Amino acid sequence: MVLEPDRNKISADDKDLSFVTVKIEDANGNLVPHADNLIHFKVKGPGSLVGVDNGNETNHESFKSDTHTAFNGLCLAVIESGGKKGKITITATSDGLAPVSTTINTEEIK
């Protein structure tokens, strides 16, 4: 798995978001298009997980959960900043795959 945030820095204003894409890849770094693994998300630091999705319009899983299945090898986690400056660490795990983490920095706006 690979985690790719759309932004590595967001405002510490309790509103700013970063969209983190989870890609399930093979050993050569190629997307596995039929992967439908259940992904578990954990967030530490001054932020929170506010939504998950996979782009499959027929999927009925909750958007407000800390787990979601991948669709076509992809999944999305929406991270919202808290009110403090710091580092938000997002970790994704799935059975049979190595866990992965990424960091998003939050900065105070003056």
Image: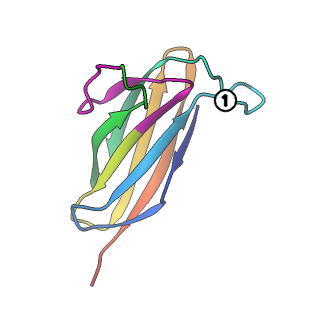
> Which image quarter: residue 69?
top left
Task: Give me the residue at 63% from left, 22% from top.
Answer: 33
Q: Is residue 15 magenta?
A: no
Q: Is residue 108 above or below residue 62?
A: below
Q: Is residue 9 left or right of residue 34?
A: left
Q: Quadrant of the C terminus?
A: bottom left
Other residues around mark 1 within 10 Å, as few (<14) / some (14–19) / many (≥20)? some
Q: Residue furthest right?
A: 28
Residue drawn at x 45%, y 45% as measured from the top left: 20
Residue 18, x across and y down, in percent: 39, 54
Q: Nearer the viewer, residue 63 or 14?
A: 63
Q: Main secondary structure of the magenta part?
A: loop
For the N terminus, the image quarter is: top right
- Left or right, 75 with respect to 72, comes to left
Residue at the disc numbered 1: 31
- Most extreme residue toward the front is 57
Q: Residue at x 38, y 65 (%)?
A: 10
Q: Position of residue 46 (x, y in %)?
A: 28, 56
Q: Nearer the viewer, residue 18 or 61?
A: 61
Q: Nearer the viewer, residue 41 or 78?
A: 78
Asked if residue 104 lies left or right of residue 79, the reply is right
Q: Is residue 32 above or below residue 15?
A: above
Tell me the SS state at disc 1: loop
Is residue 45 in view from this perspective?
A: no
Residue 17 versus residue 71 in the image, above or below:
below
Residues shaded magenta: 59-76
Taking the image as drawn, is residue 109 in sight? yes
